[in-house]
Image (spheres, rainbow, N blue to C red):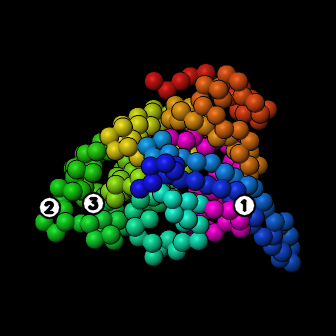
């Protein structure tokens, strides 16, 4: 571990999707990410906010090594991980985990809760031969899931419970960085608050860094002391929560703030 450097350094990332043409339709190329840079310290939360289509998911896929950027660098724990092969780099995979928006889409519907949570442990050879039931029920307890649900399937769970399973799966490997890509957008507002509070509790307990990605500035304000605002593939403004809300510099940020409904999370 390098104490002096941030845990994650993202430097001048660019990604353009090529255009395509069929006999009936022509799609122009899309500059999805254009020169994005930011840093994230160990244990810190950075909120990344922007409307649909601004490039948030492209950026998170680049950070997870799922797609390659055209230009730029991603450094994790002082190591250049831009061109890594995610499947082969198990250690990195262990340290950086992602929670997706749609737990139903990201959980294997044919697997039980137990098998879903155990899978990353198995892949990384960390599932204890004896005592694995205890390992799984500990993780379920950490995310507030009753151990009675251990043999149920995703279809038998509520949206909030499914997202708790997704979080337990991500936590299983004790990552240092969790990318939360719209983790509550698919949930009812009352359930959203429960999941956000769970994420805060887990961060306090385990000192993980969070990159919290959302289109919803209310949610980002609740979660992140530092916020980066993304607009049309670029970060147009980064600042402390207070500064963003009281003295936003960019007109787009001011529009986002003006559009926030009045209720708050408690
Ligand atoms: N595989 C792809 N091929 C071509 N264009 C793409 C592809 N994926 C995304 N795009 C385009 O890149 C831009 C950024 O998309 P991206 O999904 O990263 O944004 P986003 O902010 O995450 O939006 P959303 O929340 O709706 O997913 C959009 O214009 C989108 O249409």
Pointers 1 and 3 in contact (C-beta within 8 Å): no
Give the image quarter of residue 242.
top right
- Sequence order check, earlier mark of 1 and 3: 1
Say if disc 3 is inside 8 Å of ligand 1. no
Tell me where residue 114 appears, x and y as whole percent: 27, 60
The residue identified by callout 3 is 114
Q: Is residue 152 placed above or below 124 in the rendered structure? A: above
Q: What residue is rendered at 48% in x and 57% in y?
A: 77
* Residue 132 place in picture, x, y as percent: 19, 62
Q: Residue at x 77, y 33 (%)?
A: 250
Q: Which residue is mark 2?
A: 131
- Left of 137 or right of it: where is 263? right
Q: Nearer the viewer, mark 1 or mark 2?
A: 1
Q: From the image, tell me which residue sits under label 1.
A: 14
Question: Magenta segment, which residues?
Answer: 45-73
Instruction: Relative to 208, say whether 14 is above or below.
Output: below
Q: Position of residue 99 (x, y in %)?
A: 47, 53
């Amino acid at each position: 571990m390098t104490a002096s450097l941030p845990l994650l350094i993202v430097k001048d990332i660019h990604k353009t999707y090529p255009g395509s043409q069929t006999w009936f339709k022509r799609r122009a190329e899309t500059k999805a990410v254009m020169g994005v840079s930011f840093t994230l310290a160990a244990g810190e939360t950075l909120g990344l906010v922007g409307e649909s289509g601004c490039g948030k998911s492209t950026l998170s896929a680049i950070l997870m090594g799922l797609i390659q950027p055209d230009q730029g660098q991603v450094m994790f724990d002082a190591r250049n991980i831009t061109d890594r092969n995610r499947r082969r780099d198990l250690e990195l995979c262990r340290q950086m985990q992602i929670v997706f928006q749609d737990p139903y889409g990201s959980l294997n519907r044919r697997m039980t809760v137990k098998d879903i949570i155990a899978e990353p442990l198995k892949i990384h050879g960390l599932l204890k031969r004896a005592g694995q039931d205890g390992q799984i029920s500990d993780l379920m307890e950490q995310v507030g899931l009753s151990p009675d649900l251990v043999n149920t399937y995703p279809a038998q769970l509520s949206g909030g419970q499914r997202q708790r399973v997704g979080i337990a799966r991500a936590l299983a490997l004790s990552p240092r960085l969790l990318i939360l890509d719209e983790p509550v957008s698919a949930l009812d507002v009352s359930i959203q608050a429960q999941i956000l509070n769970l994420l805060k509790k887990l961060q306090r307990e385990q000192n993980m860094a969070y990159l919290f990605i959302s289109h919803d500035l209310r949610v980002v304000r609740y979660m992140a002391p530092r916020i980066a605002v993304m607009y049309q593939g670029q970060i147009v403004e980064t600042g402390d929560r207070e500064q963003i809300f009281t003295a936003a510099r960019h007109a787009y940020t001011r529009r986002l703030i003006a559009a926030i409904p009045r209720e708050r999370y408690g």
